[in-house]
Protein backbone atom coordinates (compact mmCIF):
# COMPACT_ATOMS: atom_id res chain seq x y z
CA UNK A 1 0.00 0.00 0.00
CA UNK A 2 1.23 3.45 -0.86
CA UNK A 3 1.31 6.25 1.69
CA UNK A 4 1.46 10.01 1.06
CA UNK A 5 3.28 12.74 2.92
CA UNK A 6 2.91 16.47 2.30
CA UNK A 7 5.20 19.41 3.00
CA UNK A 8 8.49 17.53 2.77
CA UNK A 9 10.98 20.39 2.51
CA UNK A 10 14.46 20.43 1.00
CA UNK A 11 16.88 23.34 0.92
CA UNK A 12 17.70 24.59 -2.56
CA UNK A 13 21.16 23.03 -2.40
CA UNK A 14 19.94 19.59 -1.23
CA UNK A 15 19.45 16.93 -3.95
CA UNK A 16 16.09 15.19 -4.42
CA UNK A 17 17.87 11.97 -3.45
CA UNK A 18 17.63 13.20 0.15
CA UNK A 19 13.84 12.82 0.12
CA UNK A 20 14.16 9.26 1.49
CA UNK A 21 16.14 10.55 4.47
CA UNK A 22 13.69 13.40 5.11
CA UNK A 23 10.69 11.05 4.98
CA UNK A 24 12.33 8.51 7.29
CA UNK A 25 13.35 11.20 9.80
CA UNK A 26 9.87 12.73 9.85
CA UNK A 27 8.22 9.35 10.47
CA UNK A 28 10.87 7.97 12.82
CA UNK A 29 11.78 5.10 10.50
CA UNK A 30 15.03 3.75 9.11
CA UNK A 31 15.86 4.84 5.57
CA UNK A 32 15.84 1.19 4.48
CA UNK A 33 12.15 0.87 5.39
CA UNK A 34 11.17 3.49 2.78
CA UNK A 35 10.88 2.40 -0.86
CA UNK A 36 9.34 3.41 -4.18
CA UNK A 37 9.36 7.15 -3.46
CA UNK A 38 7.41 9.06 -6.10
CA UNK A 39 7.09 12.82 -6.32
CA UNK A 40 3.44 13.77 -6.75
CA UNK A 41 3.84 17.52 -6.47
CA UNK A 42 6.71 20.00 -6.21
CA UNK A 43 6.67 23.63 -5.26
CA UNK A 44 8.78 26.48 -3.97
CA UNK A 45 8.20 28.04 -0.55
CA UNK A 46 9.62 31.57 -0.81
CA UNK A 47 7.62 33.16 2.01
CA UNK A 48 10.78 33.68 4.07
CA UNK A 49 13.13 35.17 1.48
CA UNK A 50 16.49 34.19 2.95
CA UNK A 51 15.21 30.65 3.62
CA UNK A 52 13.70 29.57 0.27
CA UNK A 53 12.86 25.84 0.13
CA UNK A 54 11.60 23.27 -2.33
CA UNK A 55 8.49 21.56 -0.96
CA UNK A 56 7.21 18.16 -2.09
CA UNK A 57 4.20 15.92 -1.75
CA UNK A 58 5.43 12.35 -2.08
CA UNK A 59 4.00 8.84 -2.24
CA UNK A 60 6.05 5.94 -0.91
CA UNK A 61 5.88 2.41 0.42
CA UNK A 62 6.89 1.32 3.92
CA UNK A 63 8.28 -2.13 4.66
CA UNK A 64 6.20 -2.60 7.85
CA UNK A 65 3.08 -0.44 7.59
CA UNK A 66 1.51 -1.74 10.80
CA UNK A 67 3.83 0.32 13.00
Image (spheres, helix red, strand yellow):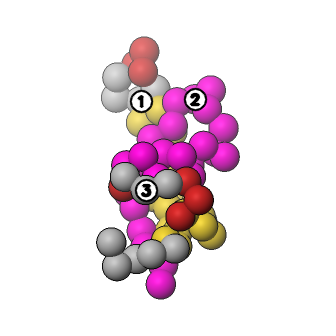
Left or right of residue 8, residue 35 in this image: right
Residue 39, x across and y down, in percent: 57, 61
Disc 3 and disc 2: Cα gap in Å?
24 Å
In the image, 20 versus 66, the foreground residue is 66
Determine the secondary structure under disc 2: loop
Residue 65, x across and y down, in percent: 40, 77
In the image, 61 versus 10, the foreground residue is 61
Determine the secondary structure under disc 3: loop
Q: Residue furthest bottom?
A: 1
Determine the secondary structure under disc 1: loop
Residue 30, x across and y down, in percent: 49, 54
> On the image, numbered disc 2 is attached to which residue?
12
Is residue 10 at least partly visible in the picture? yes
Q: Residues within 10 Å of mark 2 (few under 14, many from 20)?
A: few
> On the image, numbered disc 3 is attached to which residue?
29
Specify which label sits upstream in the sequence, 3 or 2: 2
Mark 3–mark 2 CB contact (< 8 Å): no
Disc 1 and disc 2: Cα gap in Å?
11 Å
Quarter of the picture containing the C terminus is bottom left
- Vertically, is 23 above or below 37? above
Q: State which mark lies toward you, 1 or 3.
A: 3
The residue that appears at 46% across and 26% down in the rendered structure is 52
Checking the image for residue 46, the label placed there is 1
Give, as a single range, the part of the protein colored magenta: 1-26
The residue that appears at 45% across and 41% down in the rendered structure is 9
Q: State which mark lies toward you, 1 or 2.
A: 2
Q: Residue furthest top?
A: 50
Q: Is residue 22 magenta?
A: yes
The residue that appears at 66% across and 38% down in the rendered structure is 15
Amino acid sequence: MSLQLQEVALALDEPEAMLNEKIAARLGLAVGEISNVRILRRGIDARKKPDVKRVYTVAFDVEDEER
